[in-house]
Every structure is written in C-alpha cells, then in structure tokens.
Amino acid sequence: MNGVGFSIKDLHRTINSVVLVRFIISVFCLTPWTLIAQETSVFETIEDEFYREDQFYLALSYNLLSDVPQEVATRGLIGGIHFGFIRDWPVTPKGNWALGTGIGLGYDRYGQNIIAQSSQEGLPTWTIEQSPSAIEVNSLQLTTVEFPLEIRWRTSEAQSYKFWRLYAGVKWSQHLVSKTVFKGPEASETLTELSQLRKGIWYATLSFGYGIFNAQVQWGLNPLLLDVEDRVSQQSIGLRPIKLGIMFYIL
C-alpha cells in the first residue's frame, strides 16, 4: 500500500524487540533470587560441616590416694568438685575430631590418717596415725585453677546434641590455696604453710559417655608431696591422687 510507512517486516521487528526486552527484564529480576538461594545453600552446607562443641563442664569425683604406705587409710569426707569452660578446635571438616583447651577451678578434699603437724625445725612433720580414736577430723584440702588439654572424638553432628564421646588428654592443676586440718581428742591444728607440697601437678584424663553424662578418670602423674617420710617408720609418703567421677558437659 502506498503512503503507508509501516510494513509487516517492521511489525515482526517490533514484536521481537518487545520479547527481548521482557526476557532481559525477567533475567534481571530472577538473578538476585537465584544468587541468594545459592548463597544460602552454600552457607547451610558450611554450617553443617563446620561447628564447635564449646562446652562448660562440671565434674564430681571420689578421690583416692596412691604412692602411700599400706598403713594409710581413707576416712571422713573424700571428694572433689570442678567446673570451667573448654574451647573446641575442630581438626576435621565434619568436626568428629577436635582439640579442646580450657580453664577452670577445682576443690579437692582428701580425708586420711596422715597427720601434718608444725615443728621447731620449720618443716611440718607427717605421721601415720593408726589409732582411729586419735583422729576426729583429718584432711588435706586443695583449691586449684586447672588448664585441661584434650584430644576429642565424638559422633556428633551440627544439629545433634546427643552423641557418644571419648576425650583423652592432660590437665595442669595449679594449687591456689592448700591446708591440712586436724582435730583430735587432745589437740587440733590447721596448717597453711606447706612447703613440701608441690605448687601444682599434671593429671592424665579420660572421659567417656553419651550426651551430658560421662564417666571420668583423672590420674595424677606426680605425687603431691616432695621428700616426705612418716616421722615414725621413715616410710616415703608421696600422695599421688586418683579421681573417679562423673563429668557433665553442658553446651
């Protein structure tokens, strides 16, 4: 048709242009949502594979003593309580293996028949008293700050808080306050200046259990006392502690 400046070919170009514009707009609108979904998926994957088991702990123990003469017997209240925090450092992608470093406080009481008494020489004397009637109360009491180091294996996952665990390691226990308390029918004495007591000792530790409740063993690698002998028999008294108890790990 003459005088008409718009042809069928121009119409097809216009339609194609409109379709192209709509496609470009659609791509720009959908791309951010696609990226967000991909980013969320990546973060979820990372979170599933990498997590920490940072934990507060509370331990209750029954305290025994080794490296002592046969005449030594436990008596009275015996036990300890320990609490603190352990920082978890995963060493595998899924977190089943990790290292743990921490800090805590502890209190231990060792009731036995080894009596510490002051002397004119300056150093306390230590005597194994074999007559039960001569002792009403006798104990060694220690308040400590402790630094545990653990190798940790567990069957945990990022979304699960109930799992089997086996933690093994060592712990340095530094004595902050130490004293012996003795009360008998005729005399009583409390000593706080115990120069023969080590400033601190190492323990080997092992915890095993499921969930919050775990059995624990702490084995003293050093004796508590240095160069101490029974005043009467001259037998060596070392006082190497062994602690059997329950460990509660709280996430």
Image: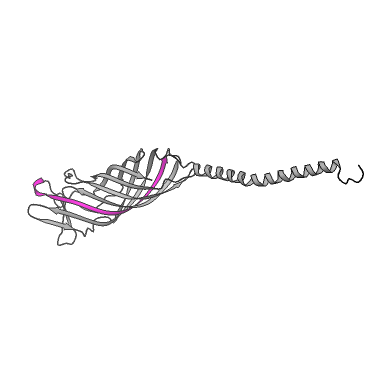
Residue 24: in magenta span: no
| 92, 227: nearer the viewer | 92
Over which residues does the magenta segment extend? 131-153
Position of residue 98 measured from the top left corner of the image (x, y, whole percent) = 44, 44
| 8, 112: nearer the viewer | 8
| 19, 173: nearer the viewer | 19
Q: Quadrant of residue 196?
A: bottom left
Left or right of residue 173: residue 1: right
- Residue 229 seen in the current view: no
- Residue 115 seen in the current view: yes
Looking at the image, which residue is at 85% across and 40% down?
8
Looking at the image, which residue is at 86% across and 42% down?
7
| 158 is higher (above) or lower (below) than 118 | above
| 34, 98: nearer the viewer | 34
Q: Quadrant of the C terminus?
A: top left
Position of residue 184 measured from the top left corner of the image (x, y, whole percent) = 10, 52
